[in-house]
Amino acid sequence: MQETLLKLQNVEISYNGEPMVTNVNLDMKAGEILGIVGESGSGKSTLIKAAMGLLDPAGLVNKGEIFYKGQNVLELSDEKLRTIRGPEMGMIFQNCGSALCPIRTIGDQLYETMEQHGFKDREAVKKRAEKLFNKINLKDCDRILNSYPFELSGGMNQRVGIVMAMILEPELLLADEPTSALDVTVQAQVIQEMMALRDEFGTGIVIVTHNIGVVSYMADQVAVMCKGKVVEYGKTRDVIDHPQKAYTRELIQAVPRIRRG
């Protein structure tokens, strides 16, 4: 029986005292892909930030529990959370280029991340990075590591973000609109590369997106969010093929699906 990797129970999140997410219940197993879909402002990104302990200072989990492998992350100390982020829980941001330091090379930022988790051998880090770069179709590892973020395209920076999130081989990857800033061709490539990494490492993935076509292609389960609530939740094929809510049907009709080759 697969282990429960991430579980949200009756979660309510407020910003500046105003509820933004209410009564959310989600459950995913190790190695699964969970898609969270909905329009902008529906609370999708807020959920995964809460799971990572990365809510803005104005944000607060008022009610409920968020379990990672049986641990309630809301009760963990900042020190304990730092030991989990990276080796066990990774995050891909919507715009990885803006999350990178503009005045330091990709290599220096990657080495610093690894060093914080006990990896001191720069050559070993480079080899691990090169292996991941190859898996996501970036062949020129030396040039990328020696580049600054502004010297790379948006698609390349997004791939760098994937490598930085995956290099410690976390068990859970949280992806916040990872393809929304990319053109359609690069979107499809990045999605396929994330799935390949799931197949390689058995990583569970939560992907947040407004594009139900991305979820239809990737996810084992999907949660549809509207105005801070989960309005539909279940196996992806069941939800996509037999939507119960008008809001879900509108999302399906509005966005073209990515079709498997």
Image (spheres, rainbow, N blue to C red):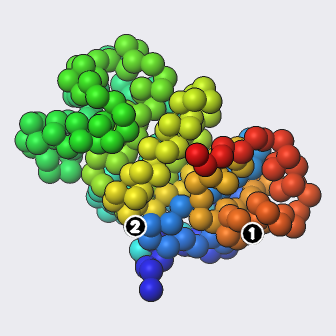
Q: Is residue 99 left or right of residue 104?
A: right
- Identify which residue is drawn at 36% across, 25% down: 101
Image point (63%, 70%), residue name: 26
Q: Residue at x 57, y 29 (%)?
A: 185
Question: Residue 184 at x, y = what percent?
Answer: 62, 30
x 59%, y 41%: residue? 177
Task: Tell whether 225 sits left or right of 125.
Answer: right
| Residue matched to label 2 | 76
Q: Is the residue 231 above or below the residue 258 in the image?
A: below
* View extreme (front): residue: 261
| Quadrant of the drawing holding the N terminus | bottom left
Observer-nearest residue: 260 or 107?
Answer: 260
Q: Answer few, some or many: residues within 10 Å of disc 1's Cα (few below 14, many 20 plus, some between 14 and 19).
A: few
Amino acid at the residue labelled 1: Asp
Q: Secondary structure at mark 2?
A: loop
Q: Measured from the top left, where is residue 157 in percent x and y? A: 42, 27
Disc 1 element = helix
Please say if 212 is above or below 123: below
Q: CA distance from mark 2 to mark 1?
A: 36 Å
| In the depicted structure, whether residue 9 falls above or below residue 243 | below
Viewer-nearest of discs 2 and 1? 1
- Can I make out residue 235 in this image? yes
Q: Nearer the viewer, residue 114 or 241?
A: 241
**Marks 2,1: beta carbons within 8 A:** no
Check residue 165 in the rendering and tell me which mark sits there, or answer none: none
Identify the image quadrant of residue 23. bottom right
Instruction: Using the rendered view, name the quadrant where residue 57 is placed.
Output: top right
Q: Is residue 93 visible?
A: no
Q: What amino acid is found at the position of numbered circle 2 in the picture? A: Leu
Question: Residue lying farthest top?
Answer: 151
Which mark, residue 238? 1
* First along the sequence among labels 2 and 1: 2
